[in-house]
Amino acid sequence: MAKKRKGDDDPGVLRIGNKTISLDGYLCKKTKTDTSSSAPNNEDPNHQQSTLVPLPHSLNSIPRGEGEGSARSAHSRPPAGDPQYFSARQALPLWTRQDDIRRILRQKDVLILVGETGSGKSTQVPQFLYQERWCQKRRVKVKAGEGVQEVSVGGMIAITQPRRVAATTLAHRVSREAGTPLDGQKEGESSNGRVSKGLVGYSVRFDHRVPPGTRIKFLTEGMLLQELLRDPHLRQYSAIIVDEIHERSVDVDLLSGFLKQIISGNKAGRGGIPLKVVIMSATANVESIKRFFSETKPENPAPAPTSETSVESLQVEGRQFPVDIVHTPKPVPDIQETLLKTIFKLHTEEALSDRHGRKDILAFLTGQEEIESAQRLIEEYASTLDPKLPKIKVFPLFGQLSIEAQHEAFQPVKGSFTRKVVLATNIAETSVTVPGVRYVIDCGKSKVKQFRPRLGMESLLAKPISQSSAVQRAGRAGREGPGKCFRLYTKETYETLPKTDLPEILRTDILSAILTMKAKGIDDVLSFPLMDPPEVESVEKALLHLHILGALGDDGSITETGRKMVAFPVTPPYARVLLAAADHKYDCLLEAIDIISCITAGEDIFLQLRSEETKEEVEEYRKELSRREGDLLTYLTTMQLYAAENADRVQWCKNRKINIRNMKQAWNIRKQLRGLCVRQGMMEQPLPDPQPFMPTSPDQAAVILKCFLKGFALKTAMLAPDNSYVTSHGKHIVAIHPSSVLHGQKKEAIMFLEHVYTQKNYAKKIRSVSSSTGGISESVPTQAPTRILLPTLRDSSCQISIYQTWDYLGFYWKSAPSLSHHETIPPSLGLGHVHNKGPDTRPNGAPPTDLPLSASPPGPQETPRSRRATAGR
């Protein structure tokens, strides 16, 4: 056992082994304060009756006398944690404002903290707060049914990040600063054999490391939404810190709405203890956020005087070092060529380091393909440089990389005579700091997904960034010393950029968001508090789609199927496929998991073959992977063969030109999905890999297709007489993507999992469908109501007929079945009431007599959209 001894020189220090612990918090005389001053002013009376659970001494006892009237300054006491980080932490601009942050949160429930890039808000704020008295775990009594039960409330701080790389990187950094590094807790045991306790943990999709005793937890916004479904009151948390809110993802908008409901609603579920909320950003619109959290009702344009006092804002100065901005004098014709010239000009003319440290390069590109292409060119050209020049080490950084590969970009480069070049997408814009970066090269673009609900199609195109993003990117160069940002666009172009990015909820598919709301008990989704509500049409489409998937019942409430779907970390259609595959009728869950793992692992597990020589080289290897039925079975065969490989899987991937990073990520997703399905009782524990490869039989392939049609029945297309494919949803002409194994072939019909627009309208991830296979008819609704009322549109006169409903989903009239007069019409989708006009005496296929449009149903060659245009004329 390590010896305990007082410091030889300092009587206020205790040394245990090689660790030094300050005793100032114990030896300083306690200042008398009014005990009521340290309690939040707006706490419920029940809060005073709760029992405090003392913190373990190993995690630093809470110094006494921290009340507002305390004579002791919060930042005057020595910081807790690893002493080697003290000087760096104290140099941060936020360090001198920790008194203000603590004081505000003792009095208010919501703090909006605007800290410029480099202020230290992401790493320091949780460390300022976890020692506060209101952040201790408490035992309280809450109502449970007709009785009362005692539960624990608080004790932990959650910090949300928009991306998993930010969450994991920040968790590792803060854990080292706190003296409990996550790297040393991999086995969960300390040197004496006991389970090691930590202060910091993280939780991201498919990766969770939360050691016992965690007080600070970094997690993605989506993971906190998952926790909200299990615990609507977030009882394990004393505070929620929402970082980088300016990115306005769908998840952060949903999270903000749920947090607003918690802080403005009844606190009985938390035993009267308020939840503290800190909103942080470098470029956020303070007034709009303050107004959002101050309003008691979304419809009320003016904030309520009683609730406005619970929201406070604080501005913190930011960047520690100046950054010179350099624009190009004229527009750049070739971004990649200009990028390479700029990198090598900096590398050959600028010093490798100075008194502030290393001078590495961070370049922003649009996507994985562009990054890998630039990496290859940089490495090829670097090999031809003069040996007297420093070497170059290139690190990619994008969202689909494995966590281990992402962390490589943040590690010091091996070799003192080497410059690090990081090629990143916009995931490196915020929160995370790549050590050593002093030069930033900004291409001025990023790939943006945009979902078009009217077309049921998603586009993924490189578009200009906003001024807010440009400022964030430039800020990366000034974190550790004076830096430069080279913008590959003109000053005039910068002035024309939009001020901020369009919120994601206004430009992406909100299917998952609507399902989350329904699972949380939100019946009227349009009345849910959102900073920027989506278009009504997007909400309607999502509700109808969820009804088709079986996630919503006829009354609009979430079904048991929907509750199971929301537990999966995949989109609702994929979740529906997994549930169907677990049914004894199909019994192909392992196969469905293998396919979904490959599809959700990255842009594609197969590398694109650009030369004929390369195609000939891998042709024999890929023959064993390709299946004539389409991409889905090709993915399945690839994963099964990869799992059966017991020699060298890396070489196996190289021979077949398979993206090793994406394949490893697919393997990790496969492992996590299998574990989740076992825990939910959907299957027994599968046999460990490697297992011998067994080819999928045609009968099993047909069963797998039927399972996927349960989730993707609307994504089907028929071969037209002119040899083009026309989608059943929307009647759009699509082409098979060149990456598909079915490219250039003609099939009777196809099912596709992705519908994107790049250079043209493409269907991706394709499976052929034949009339003998069937499955489509049993995967789409077999009946529809004659008329439904949508009160969520805030217009009681808005009614949709059977014709409009099916037109809305994009089907021909002939696809919409007639209702039997023996059926009792249920309410549809929970959006209102069905008006049954009595027995339906029309012959099959005849239009309803109460159609608001006077024209007859469309003919064989007439689409509903063209018919509507004709009626308008």
Image (cartoon, rainbow, N blue to C red):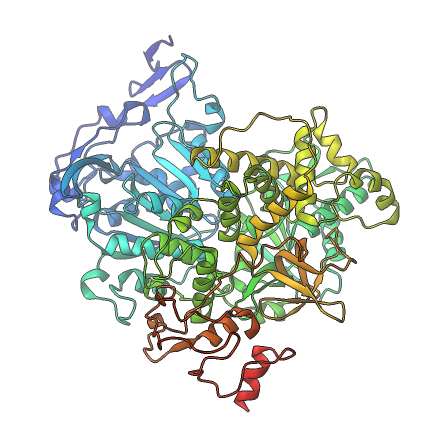
Query: Which sits in the foreground, 314 or 307?
Result: 307
Decide if residue 544 is on the left or right side of residue 657.
left
Residue reaching furthest bottom?
A: 873
Query: Is residue 865 positioned above or below 763 on the image?
Result: below
Q: Is residue 188 visible?
A: yes
Placement of the N terminus among the 4 image quadrants? top left
Q: With 282 as the anchor, is 129 left or right in this view?
A: left
- Is residue 84 toward the left or the right of residue 526 in the image? right
In the image, is 799 to the left or to the right of 346? left
Give the residue displayed 60% in from the left and 33% down from the top.
Answer: 412
Camera-side residue of 499 and 856? 856
Name above or below for residue 1 compared with residue 731.
above
Picture layout, residue 391 above or below residue 554: above
| Residue at figure coordinates x 26%, y 64% from the top left | 295
Q: Position of residue 311 (x, y in %)?
A: 27, 57
Seen from the viewer's position, the closer of residues 597 and 14 is 597
* Rendered location of residue 345, percent (x, y): 74, 50
Look at the image and tell me in which quarter the C terminus lies: bottom right
Instruction: Give the total of numbered labels.
Output: 0
Provide residue 591's location: percent of width, then percent of height.
Answer: 60, 39
Q: Residue at x 49, y 49 (%)?
A: 576
Residue 570 visible within the image: no
Q: Residue 272 or 776: which is nearer the viewer?
A: 776
* Residue 22 picture quarter: top left
Q: Position of residue 104 (x, y in %)?
A: 25, 50
